Amino acid sequence: ARTLLNLDGIHEFAFLGDGVPSLEKIDAAAIRYDDLMPVPGCFDASPRYAGKRGVAAYRITVELADESLLLLRLGALGLRGRILWDNTEIGIDELPYSQVEYKFESGPAGTHRLVLLIDNRLNFQDSPLFSVFYDFYGYGGIYRSLELFTLPQGSRFDRVRVTTVDPAARRVRLEGRMAGGSTPLRLGFDGAEPQPVEPVWHGDRFELELAVPGGQLWTPAAPQLHTVRLESSSDAIVERFGIRTVTAARGQILLNGEPLRLYGYNRHDAHPQFGPAMPPELQIADLQLMRDLGCNFVRGCHYPQSQRFLDLCDQLGMLVWEESLGWGDRLEVQQDPKFRELQKIQTRRMVCNSCNHPSVILWGFMNEGGDNHETGESLMRELAAVIREEDRSRPLTMATMHIKESRCLDAYDVISFNTYPGWYDDPDGAPRPLSRIAEELDLILSKLATPDRIDKPVILSEIGAGAIYGWRDPLNSFWSEGYQADYLDEVCRYFASHPRLNGLALWQFCDGRTYAAPRALGRPRAFNNKGTFDEYRRAKPAAEVVKRHFTSWN
Ligand code: ADA
């Protein structure tokens, strides 16, 4: 049978620094461990290694009672990793922020050692998905949980996908794969004793459709969840899901057939003390803050979210835009074959990992990647195809910064754009009038009113202004809390009176660490300061303003 060993906790640790070769060339057996580090955790978020770049090694001892087939599930690491079991390589992880899995034989019962070599050097050759200076800090570490499963010897399940086919009839489709081929199956919902079922088999894949007894719809107001347990003679798994559909049609986003208006924030899963290795108490606190402001929507920018965060959103009824890792990648980067390949792999993984979360209502990719030239266009179309191959039960979108010149708005089910009128758009550096917001948004909406676009829902996926926490100024100048509060007030007023906008994700929930160079003036403190909360989640005055608007729409 399956057993689970959680490998989170305190690992032995060694920082090898920057002067070492690439991960593949490091002799892991020769490493001397002289420190300790928590997992999940980022070594460069801790004061001793703050800001350091190089290779670090994590080691943990695992005792196994039997020789088994193992599956290591790594919730996410950054920026690149090499994984060794008893000094034998079992995988290279080049997908920062993605949940990945490795299968391998344990070897004899007894004591084993798992080593993770982590490289956080920003180097395009080794780590194309996080190579350049993105506008969020590239931390080194094991961002999310590390779990080790022993797998059953006979046939065994991969993930089983649950998709709602008819919300009114509470009918769902289950699709799965049985490693080892077809075998009799039993199934039970919500803790009921599993009963034999007769799925349709295509080789080792099975599919069946059935109604959930006593099933209830999942909605943000009543986020009802169900579970399904599947058993074979040698294996059993449980999947949690919600009964709901999401579609984009006639200029609307529809949940169970009802039009939705989305309003909330872009949120980075990060904190100065933990980097992206966010403890659950902080994730819950963030969701509580967002709910208190009246948000029904969060854009998980700019990478796949942790499964735990999505679980919390499922339970709390928060609607999520989930996107794969990318940030403003332009022509030279998009031309790179390895970059393109890894983009597709991570995007497919994201869909496979997150497909059963009812909270996830939109897939996205390549935030602000150039989609105004042929190379970018082909990549966007390829990524859209990857998502559609895996899952057609949700709309897909992409946050473009080229809304006026994009070559592929037709490839997306929902059109999304980022814009910062009144913040970045005046070269002389003088304070910009707030009337810039309406002027610019009017212009964009007029371009989205053409017959070929009118049926596509539209999300304003980023807009905002920077404010330094505590900085008050009678002139409401740039960087003051007053300018930001007035700015977001204007944005919310515009959104309220323009139904063509189906969604609004303000930039951003809280301040977040980035780099001072090459944008020192735009990033005082080396933080992106456009948060409504600062990095410790202390509210700026804009929070009250946003709350007034959002709660009045609920
Ligand atoms: C972009 C980007 C964000 C952030 C923002 C800003 O739109 O998508 O991650 O960098 O700009 O603050 O300028």
Image (tube, grey):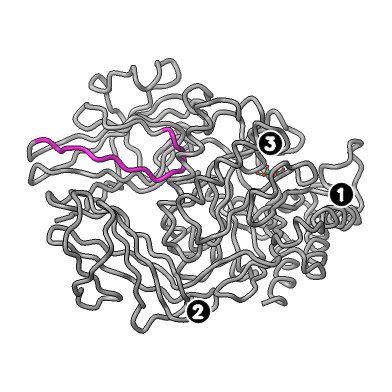
Residue at position x 72%, y 77% in the image: 552
Query: Nearer the observer, disc 2 or disc 1?
Result: 2
> Which residue is at 38% across, 45% downward?
40
Q: How many marks?
A: 3
Please tell me in which quarter of the rendered image ligand 1 is found. top right
Magenta residues, start to end: 94-107
| Quarter occupied by residue 451 | bottom right
Residue at 63% across, 56% down: 413
Q: Amino acid at mark 1?
A: Ser
Residue 459 lies within the magenta run: no
Q: Label 1: which residue?
A: 477
Quarter holding the N terminus? bottom left
Task: State which tag comes first along the sequence, 2 or 1.
Answer: 2
Residue 76 location, quadrant: top left
The C terminus: image quadrant: bottom right
Residue 221 horizontal/vertical position (percent): 54, 78
207 over 60 or under it: above or below: below
Q: Position of residue 411 (x, y in %)?
A: 64, 48
Left or right, residue 323 beside residue 261: left
Residue 370, which numbered label?
Answer: 3
Q: Which residue is mark 2?
A: 222
The reply to whether the C-beta atoms of the residues labelled 3 and 1 are less than 8 Å apart is no
Most foreground residue, 63 or 201 = 201
Q: Residue at x 41, y 61 (%)?
A: 356
Mark 2 or 3 closer to N-term?
Answer: 2
Residue type of the residue flagged with mark 3: Gly
Q: Residues within 10 Å of mark 1 (few under 14, many from 20)?
A: some
Mark closer to the observer (3, 1): 3
Other residues around mark 3 within 10 Å, as few (<14) / some (14–19) / many (≥20): many
State which mark lies toward you, 2 or 3: 3
